[in-house]
Amino acid sequence: MSQSQETVHYPLPQTGALDAPADWQRLRSQCPVASVQLPSGDEATLLTRHEDIKTLLSDPRFARPTAQDGAARLAPDGGGGAVASSSADALSLPAKGEPHQQWRRQVSKWFTAKRMTALRPGMTATAERLVDDMVALGAPADLKAHVGFLLPVYVICDMLGVPAQDRDRFSHWSDALLSLTRFTKEETDRAQIEFVQYMSGHIESKRENPTDDLISTLIRDSADGQGLSDSELLATALGLLIAGHETTANMIGKMVGMLLADRSRWEQLLADPSLVRTAVEEALRFDTNLGFGLRRYISEDTEIGGQTVPGGTTVICSMPAANRDEDVFDNAEEMDLDRSPNPHLIFGAGPHSCLGQALARTELQVVLEVLLRKLPTLELAVPVEELQRVEGLLVGGLRTVPVRW
């Protein structure tokens, strides 16, 4: 089946909150370069095979769409949050080439394995405190609200030097900027203005009173003439605050949900806690509910999966679909907690792979270690069929993760 013979509506329909869309396997085998209609009514191209997605994401010529590209709109009437529309000048960063790589070099110093090792004891202490607080309130409890959301917020706020007590505002602004259909355009515009004003004030305060945090360090680098422009500094702070808590908070909830959905998985980890690292990687691979997927703007005619995709096309890479590709993963539909190697694409690939992946991995490992140690009797407090998905945002997750112990 060729790309032109079928147009499917995207996002693809899913049944259970942790289930894979029925269309993934069919699209990978029959229509790996598929035409899809977005909520806006615009058309894009969807990739579902591991090889195609890894090749495209590793190609330095192509990056996420910018306001200048005229790319496919995601939301109706051009709505959607700033991250969805890629149209906010205040949130723009160099999208590709040497400017992008220079930006990555400046910021990536804060996400090295050495720094993660140094942060780990503090993360563990925070996770233990959050679990203790949840237990004190009694079961059942929402693990996402009490642990999954709070741990990444505390960590990223500490890294950026912003007060964690503002977390509810950060959460609202993040949701608005990641909105696909949940918020109106007026609501997302207002949230963006408020968020930019807040973060601009924070950056100014760090100029006057620098401390040992990422923003202060980037300001010092800029003063030396080798750092970021003011707009890049603002976009970096906003982007890290959104990505640093929203996606990881959702992933903590989904990981625990997956491990408890079939409790033999939890029992396997209790019997052998050394599997935590590979279990985290497998949870990342097995996640069906990542969200919209990574977008790339194809600026010139390009061959993908044996087909020519014309310049001017917006391509959506479904990494979770690629992570179920039987050509790459044996028994791809099974959750194998000691799977190795595990070349999943959940953090992307190539020059635009996720900068914060070492941080996300560390947080996921720490949460899992603490829960196994402190709450070995943990279980879902509702049938897995009653878990509900986050709707209307670019990122996927579970609304709540009700647990008891």
Image (spheres, rainbow, N blue to C red):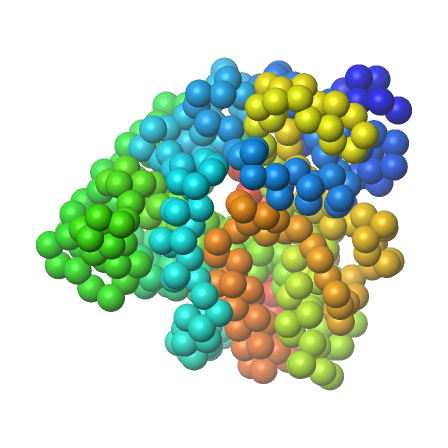
Depth order, front residue of 265/117: 117
Please report the residue visible at 61 percent of the width from the left and 22 percent of the height from the top.
300
Q: Quadrant of residue 82?
A: top left
Res 310 seen here? yes
Q: Is residue 339 left or right of residue 172?
A: right
Q: Position of residue 137 (x, y in %)?
A: 46, 70
Please name the residue shown 85% across and 50% down the image.
327
* In this picture, residue 150 sits left or right of residue 304: left
Q: Quadrant of residue 188?
A: top left
On the rendered image, what quadrant is the C terminus found in? Answer: bottom right
The image shows residue 183, relative to residue 254, as above or below, that is: above
Q: Position of residue 321 (x, y in %)?
A: 74, 43
Q: In the rendered image of this protein, does residue 129 appear above or below residue 67?
A: below
Of 397 and 383, which appears nearest the observer? 397
| 318 left or right of 21 in image | left
| Residue ID at (37%, 23%) | 186
Residue 36: which quarter of the image?
A: top right
**Residue 234 appears in the rendering:** no
Q: How many marks?
A: 0
Side (left or right) of 235 relative to 347: left
Which residue of the protein is positioned furthest toward the left in this rendering? 208
Q: Position of residue 245 (x, y in %)?
A: 44, 54
Q: Residue at x 44, y 46 (%)?
A: 101
Q: Position of residue 3 (x, y in %)?
A: 79, 22
For the N terminus, the image quarter is: top right
Is 68 drawn above or below residue 60 in the view shown? above
